[in-house]
Image (cartoon, rainbow, N blue to C red):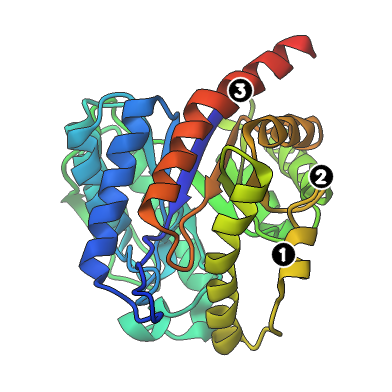
Amino acid sequence: MEIGTYSFGDTQRDEDGTPRSTAEAICNLFQAIVHADGVGLDYFAVGEHHTVSMPASSPGTIIAAAAAATKNIILGSGASIIGTDDPVRVFQQFAIADALSGGGRVEITAGRGSSVESFPLFGYELGDYDKLYAEKLDLLMTINASPTESITWSGSVRPSLNQLAVVPRPVRGSVPIWLATGGNAASSVRAGQLGLPISYGIIGGEPHRFAPLANLYRRSAAEAGHEGDSVKVAVAALGLVAPTKEEALDRFYPGWHNLTLEMGRLRGWSPQDRHVFEAQTGEHGAFYVGAPDEIARRIVNLRGYMGHMRHFLQSDVGGLPQEHLLESITLLATEVKPRVERLLEKK
């Protein structure tokens, strides 16, 4: 089972709460990816946001830089917001990253985006949300599946392509494309019908309740004739690993609280306190915040429901100090992953 982490970039804060440089946040993210590779983590995803607090606005750019500076880790987007981007450019960026990695270490995760700041930024209408995603995902898959550089495609959301070259090609001809969802049944069906692996972002509630969606996904894939390695499930969640549960809670809560305040202003959420936070860090909660033994046990427990092959955590939220992020990554790779492997061997 693969263990990993993901990030949207995390802008640090001064002692008075003032945000520091977004450029620093990107450098910190790059440092974290290189560190993750060095300690043996399996996977690192870079998600797309366009905010001061989460400034990783171009996952492909960061992944290309990291691909040239790492040796073993799998790198992916988590996710690329396909509806407001150009699939041709997304494919080209990730094909370049794949070449720099030596081939076989770069993936694209295509998402619709639960945050919609990219729509006004790039001049799209929210009313076209579904159509943009469906057509642009189709174009991305068409390019990826092509045996040559020459691409022909037509749709209504961007100019058609008529035997135009899209270069470069990935080292092995294509890159894995995943579909990201926050728990939408229609997205589970879509991924299954298309034969794409699916990544569930579980940021609240009880993760095991997503099991019916994973079953729906697998059933949809089987009915469409898809099987084998293309049918697989990943789980993304919030979490932080520290030497003790108490340290993990105390380190993660301030940033989580900052994040909920920001999201509350943007989305109208009610304020969340420490009691609500700690309730989500329990045995059946959505936050994987604790010491290695607990985190490994909970990952394996969820695998019994979801059957997922990859579990990865977002730790750097709300200005988490960089040293705590790096330590969490180290513990995921050197303490959590071996425990997960031993627990699975016993099953």
Residue 324 x %, y %: 44, 49
Kind of residue at badge 1: Phe
The residue at 79%/40% (across/down) is 215
* Other-residue count near label 3 (Cα within 10 Å), few / some / many at <14 / 14–19 / ≥20: few
Measure how far apart labels 1 and 3 are at the Cα level.
38 Å
Measure how far apart labels 3 and 2 are at the Cα level.
32 Å
Q: Is residue 235 above or below residue 180?
A: above
Residue 9 x %, y %: 36, 60
- Name of the residue lying farthest toward the top: 345
Residue 252, numbered circle: none
Q: Is residue 133 above or below residue 60?
A: below
Question: Hey, which quadrant is residue 259 in on the image?
Answer: bottom right
Instruction: Decide which of 158, 277 is in the foreground and name it.
Output: 277
Residue 87 x %, y %: 33, 58
Disc 1 designates what residue?
277
Residue 187 appears anywhere in the view: yes
Question: Hey, which quadrant is residue 43 in on the image?
Answer: top left
Q: Secondary structure at mark 3?
A: helix
Considering only order in the chain, which callout, 2 or 1, is on the residue closer to the N terminus?
1
Kind of residue at badge 2: Glu
The residue at 39%/81% (across/down) is 16
Considering only order in the chain, which callout, 2 or 3, is on the residue closer to the N terminus?
3
Disc 1 to disc 2: CB gap under 8 Å: no
Q: Nearer the viewer, mark 3 or mark 2?
A: 2
Q: Is residue 110 left or right of residue 269?
A: left
Instruction: Decide which of 119, 186 is in the foreground and name it.
Output: 119
Disc 3 designates what residue?
228
Disc 2 designates what residue?
283
Question: Hey, which quadrant is residue 40 in on the image?
Answer: top left
Q: Secondary structure at mark 1?
A: helix
The residue at 39%/77% (across/down) is 118
Q: Nearer the viewer, mark 1 or mark 3?
A: 1
